[in-house]
Image: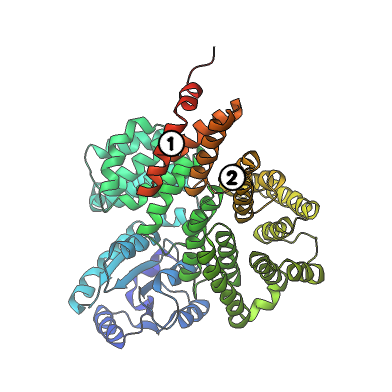
Amino acid sequence: MEKADLSRLEALKVLIVDDQYLVHNVLKEAFDELGIRQLKYAENAYYALRLCEQHRFHIVICAFNVKSDKDGFHLLEELKFKGYVNKRTVLIFLSAETDESLVNSIVELQPDDFWVKPLDRARVKQRLPLVLNVKRTLFDVYEAIDLKNYSKAIYQADRHLLNPKLSRFHLQLLRMKGEALLKLQEFEDAERFYLELMQKHHMSWVHLGYVNALLKQDKMQQIEVLLTEMTDRIDTRFATYDLLAQYYIERQDFDRAYEEIKKAVALAPRNIERNKKVWDLARLTHDFEGQYLATQAMAKHAKNSLHDSPVLALNVIRAGLDLAQTLSNDRSKKLLQQTDRHIQALEKDYKDAALFKEQITIAKARLLLANDERKKAENLIDLHVSVRPIISLDDNLDKAKVFHELGRREEAALIMDAVKKQISSDNLTGLVVKKYVEQECDEQERVHFTPKQLQSMAVEFFKKKKYGAALSALEQAMELMPKNNKIPISVLKVLALMFEEGGLSASQKELALRTVSLLDKSELLDEELQNVVQYKERLSLVLAQAMLPME
């Protein structure tokens, strides 16, 4: 697109994506009066994409609620991804909804304007020339950003900022300059830039840019009060949670990162990459319920988008199987039945499901194992699953998992070795995924049973008064399920009995202290709290000794 195009209204090409003819008519009448004649209409995302393949549009106006297939958020995401829309394109979003989650999602896509339905012809005639004027005037800055030439973008922005005739555009220029400084990782310059702006301006983007610059320099203490204020403000809390999540990931404080990213996703649930981050952090922090919810959210919000894939349905199945291994029998049974239905739906609904034959077979085998049908699972794996690793990291992790659950540890280790090589040769793999793979390798090497098997073993050992063996099984189960309060409470129960019957070793005393510390940080039900208080009293002498400094 050339700058001159935006000055000739009769030459402008406009795409209107909306399934309401009333909207088409209002926009047609308003644009006709402005002298804009080249309009194309699409009632759904499918036709919008086809039109974008055939034409280069200067203006794209897109409704959020495109009922026929994908919503406007995912359509615009795809248009940007495929290069049909960039910073030089005039992008306008339409919606009758103004709830916080929608607004947060729209802000992420940075449209040039947001028009609330029902549309008013006079209002359209007033707003569009203003938007076009901004795009024309700042065209060279937008072009530099599209080309990822951030140094040039700063140069052009500074040049415009010196022109008093452009004073009404100064805020937009300042915003783009700050974003370019952050892209160039000039964090000290960005800090000074935003700090100076904060003396005069109180817009949300100024505070967010300042916070981002300081977090990148690990200056958390300087902005603790400001962070509290920003998480209380509707216009900044979503982006602040997102920045904090990234900050904690970079410092490998994954529990804190997980809490922050969940808050961000709750406020803007449509972003698939952010939901993927929730899933990865849930896996790393052993939150099986969180894993399952995250995979469900990805499958739901990706429906009919560029992210839609049988892989997302597979991930729901895998997370469901993992979660079922941690639940009581009744809940586990219901979830396994639901997972069975998910497998059947995957095979039936996706035309490409045949391409995932081995992955689906592994899921079926894991389902059989979870239902205690080991012989059938072994036959299925022996007949249809090879030990050879495949391209996808998650496919390999699941393949290793089924061999591990079958007790075939050499085969599981062989595949995990391939996974480790995949990680080391892939520069794009995130820190969270790398840590999760390392953790999975370590746990498979040391822990040879599923959480459910370990809990059953602990119960059997306890009944036979083999408290040491019961404690060993519970300790491994607690490592795999640190968020399940029942397991550490059972650990305290066994330790209390062992102490009363003959005392505890130094390592067992340390385990008691570690378990109490874990439970003190957990949210406990009344009955659970009563049990913890009781066991702490019985272990009070042990706990007091364990807390004494070593001589």
Locate residue 54 relative to residue 387 in the image: left or right. Answer: left
Locate residue 503 relative to residue 528 in the image: left or right. Answer: right
Residue situated furthest top in the rendering: 551
Q: Which residue is at 31% across, 52% downward?
A: 172
Residue 205, x across and y down, in percent: 31, 48
Residue 383, x across and y down, in percent: 81, 71
Q: Which residue is at 39% across, 84% downward?
A: 41
Q: Quadrant of the C terminus?
A: top right
Q: Quadrant of residue 110?
A: bottom left
Q: Amino acid at mark 1?
A: Phe
* Residue 150 vs residue 456, the one in the foreground: 456
* Residue 397 vs residue 366, the one in the foreground: 366
Q: Amino acid at mark 2?
A: Leu
The answer to whether 85 is drawn above or below residue 485 in the figure is: below
User: Going from the N terminus, do you reach mark 1 or mark 2 first?
Assistant: 1
Q: Secondary structure at mark 1?
A: helix
> Circle 1 is placed at which residue position?
187
The answer to whether 415 is drawn above or below residue 362 in the figure is: above
| Residue 156 visible to the viewer | no
Locate residue 330 relative to residue 413 in the image: left or right. Answer: left
Residue density around tag 2, few if under 14, some if 14–19, many if 20 or more, within 10 Å? many
Residue 345, x across and y down, in percent: 58, 79
Q: Secondary structure at mark 2?
A: helix
Q: Which mark is drawn over residue 474?
A: 2
Measure how far apart labels 1 and 2 are at the Cα level. 47 Å
The answer to whether 363 is drawn above or below residue 282 in the figure is: below
Q: Which residue is at 29% across, 67% downward?
A: 114
* Residue 234 vs residue 443, the one in the foreground: 443
Residue 534, x across and y down, in percent: 41, 38
| Residue 60 visible to the viewer | yes
* Residue 176 vs residue 227, the one in the foreground: 227
Q: CB under 8 Å between callouts 1 and 2?
A: no
